[in-house]
Image: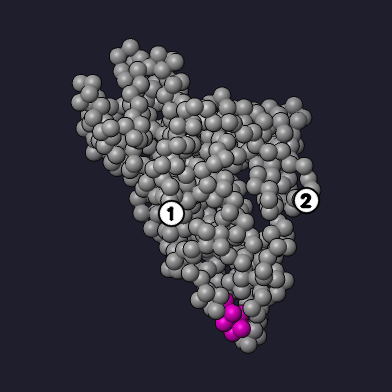
Amino acid sequence: MILGDQLTPGVSALRAGDRARDRVLMAEVMAEASYVPHHKKKIAFVFSAMRHFAEELRGEGWQVDYVKLDDPGNSGSLGGEVRRAAARTGLSRVLVTEPGEWRLLEEMRGWSDTELLPDDRFLADRHGFAEWAEGRKGLRMEHFYRLMRRKTGLLMEGDQPAEGRWNFDAENRSKADPDLLMPRPPRFAPDAITREVLDLVAARFPENFGTLEPFWFAVTRADAEAAFDHFVRHALPQFGTYQDAMLEGQAFLYHAVISPYLNAGLLDPLDLCRKVEAAWRAGAVPINSAEGFIRQVIGWREFVRGIYWWQMPGYDRVNALEAQRALPGFYWTGETPMNCLRACVEQTRDEAYAHHIQRLMVTGNFALLAGIDPHQLHEWYLSVYADAYEWVELPNTVGMSQFADGGLLASKPYVASGAYIDRMSNYCRGCAYDVKAKAGPKACPFNLLYWDFIARHRDRLARNPRMAQMVRTWDRFAPDKQEQLRRDAGHFLDSLA
């Protein structure tokens, strides 16, 4: 059995199979399409990529049983389709690569005559990660990342990092100029298979979040590889410098926009990193761009997967800051006077994509400052992005973005006032609020909520070395200023719906 995020010819289940006697089962089922209200583009991407992969396997000599969502008799679940396939074919033994989500792993452990094979498409074994993590006082991605650099040899000179530094993140924080000529990711016109899927999604998921068309994602391995090659040639040289920048009307800047393809299995992570390293060694890209990309793939991506499997089950319900406020409706509609949030939500609606700073420092930062229930935010992120699978999205949300695990993953809460958003974007120019105002009805809500957050969690934050200075600043405010800031923040929070 091949799942929708296992679209890799060398996945362990296929390696263990025999073309001469085995069948491949792939199934579009409502249980997977609706366990959260996925973005229309995500459903279309996954189904179309699955159908194209089935054709690729048939071309390689496999017998493929492919069940479409609207096929008569579709049971609606993966387990149901396994049972139907067994009845259809007389075959009984199931080989499946371990899924990327805990809920599916638990379900598959209950299937009869099923052998679960490890997913070795990742560079770090999840069991080995747990052994590395167990007993450590603090888990920091940088320590893990250096292990991965040594393991892969990427950007290494012997046992030392290339150009004498492990991390060039300090050189990756420039604000982008709106008049820069920015390359767009290549767009792929829907073929007949994709058009059939788009019609299916439009008919079966009309109320789901997001616009369905124009649909331009790559849905084949060849097109995904072409998209990555385009990034390396045209965007990677500037990627590092501007990877934290945000611009209204520029959804992609210099980002690769290949995470949907990578997380679905169409691209190989080590192969991507080797191509980036080769571009650096050839002098085509600077070290800060090459290292920044490689750190995201072999460092952060592998690290959060390790955290996910080490902490599940239960990690999706952690709430160390006891945040209980409901997710505001504007996360679905974009209808808010806060221009940064409006822009990010509307971009997400249209593209099923936002880059990491938009997620962390706009939608995530607001939710953390406002005390939004982290589980509700987790389900929103899982729903709205084409690259979102629980193993990668959950730790990024409850750990990195919301500090809901109490600091297991991140060393500090990633909170910032409006000044950060103003420094890294042009969002504030078109906003109904004044980013320079610290109090009053026109004050940027991020300014009000920042100090309210510090006050609400003062005792906890005072013990955090990276936040203690801000607590001391709050403590030096005059009592009447503290009272006004908290009163203004309270009025704003009361207005959320």
Magenta highlight range: 482-489
Snapshot colouring: one colour
Residue 234 as seen in the image, left or right of residue 5: right
Q: CA distance from mark 2 to mark 1?
A: 34 Å
| Secondary structure beneath label 1 | helix
According to the picture, the residue beneath numbered tag 2 turns out to be: 177
Label 1 crowding class (10 Å Cα cut-off): few <14, some 14-19, many 20+? Answer: some
Relative to residue 284, is residue 103 depicted above or below?
Answer: below
The answer to whether any part of residue 348 appears in the image is yes
* Amino acid, disc 1: Glu
Residue drawn at x 43%, y 54% is 379
Instruction: Locate residue 23 relative to residue 289 in the image: left or right.
Output: left
Q: Looking at numbered disc 2 in the image, what kind of residue is underneath it?
A: Asp
Residue 278 pos. (x, y %) = 68, 27
* x then y, percent, for residue 95: 31, 26
- Tell me where residue 288 sits by quadrant: top right
Which sits in the foreground, 85 or 409?
A: 85
Disc 1 target residue:
379
Is 312 placed above or below 154 here?
Answer: below
- Asked if the magenta segment contains residue 195, the reply would be no
Give percent across and percent down for residue 215.
55, 38
- Horizontal side of 103 relative to 470 (left or right) equals left
Q: Nearer the viewer, residue 130 or 327?
A: 327
The mark nearer the N terminus, 2 or 1, is 2
Q: Is residue 487 above or below residue 378?
A: below
